[in-house]
Amino acid sequence: IKHGNRNGFSFFSEDLQAFSDKRSKIEKYLRTAIQNEEFEVYYQPLVDETGDILGAEALIRWRSKELGWVSPAEFIPVAEECGLILSIGDWVAEEACRTLKILEKDIYKLTPKYLSINISPRQFVQPQFTENLLTTIDKYALDHKKLRIEITENVAIDNIDLTIAKMHQLNGEGIDFMLDDFGSGYSSLSYLQKLPLQTIKIDRSFIANINNCKDNQVITSSIVGICEHFSMECIVEGVENDKELAFLKEKNITAFQGYHFYKPMPANKFLSLFI
Ligand code: C2E
Ligand code: CA
Ligand code: CA
Ligand code: CA
């Protein structure tokens, strides 16, 4: 749409234009971000009911020379669409393994049981995914239990049988799966029954406002019940204050992630928690 006028239509098309400009810039600069060393992995600890660290989630950060800080919520979808997520994902996995290796040094005490990495569907469906990941973990001679995979419900949308087979294969290699953002997607509960999952992460959207929202209370309690039934570990994300925590503890939740405990932090700061 070439020319604007005051009918509102043009404003819409200008917004759309601005959106696609930003998107193509992101794609352009993402292409060189790895070799320019613009990425960093931050770690956000997860804690038990006493506040002890259980594990941590690896979260990528991008400081572009041209665009400044860009949120993963903005660039990961672009990376998924243009395929760059494959090399970015490999890079994150390698970084997490490097960090796990460092934690094996004697100066680090009471280290986390695991680090988890986010794997997008496009990565997971790669025929080479399993082999590549195991090669990376074994390059650092790590216990396979130390690296966990976070997937979302939509990982299995295209081919559930293949997804299940792959998950079983990785399970067999000692790698555990966490279902991320549970409750935010469109999949049915029968998924849960079919997928070999070890952990469910209850989506942050149910925790925000939980003290005042009966609906979210019921949903959260129900998910806890489902996890108990299927013998899955249950983690809540996005715990931001004492009131939310008190409510969640009352519901027998024993694993928490959120700004109330720790924000995502650079590797060196994360490592210093264990000295
Ligand atoms: P996610 O996997 O659901 O990660 C949790 C997000 O919630 C992170 O945002 C984290 O910083 C944020 N968070 C943690 N605690 C709190 C809290 O108490 N309150 C609030 N408001 N937010 C909290 P972040 O780091 O911006 O990442 C956004 C999303 O980008 C992630 O959501 C994930 O889907 C994606 N992502 C991040 N790193 C990677 C990666 O290495 N690979 C892939 N494929 N996706 C990634
Ligand atoms: Ca996640
Ligand atoms: Ca999540
Ligand atoms: Ca999310």
Image: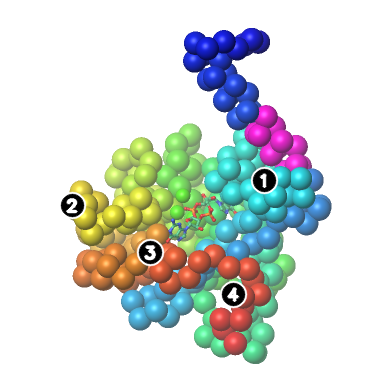
What mark, if any, has residue 240 been given in the picture? Answer: 3
- Give the percent coordinates (x, y) of residue 176: 48, 62
The reply to whether residue 89 is in sight is yes
Going by the numbered disc 4, the residue's amino acid type is Phe
Compare marks 3 and 1 and give the one earlier in the sequence. 1
The magenta segment is 21-31
Q: Is mark 3 within 8 Å of ligand 1?
A: yes
Q: Which residue lies under the disc numbered 4?
A: 270
Image quarter of residue 3: top right
Q: Residue at x 64, y 62 (%)?
A: 41
Q: Which residue lies under the disc numbered 1?
A: 86
In magenta segment, residue 22: yes
Q: Residue at x 56, y 88 (%)?
A: 109
Q: In this rendering, is residue 225 above or below 189?
A: below
Q: Tell which of 8 and 36 is nearer to you.
A: 8
Could you tell me how far apart the alpha carbons at marks 3 and 2 are, in whole angstroms?
18 Å
- Give the percent coordinates (x, y) of residue 26: 69, 39
Could you tell me how far apart the alpha carbons at marks 3 and 1 are, in whole angstroms?
32 Å
Q: Main secondary structure of the magenta part?
A: helix
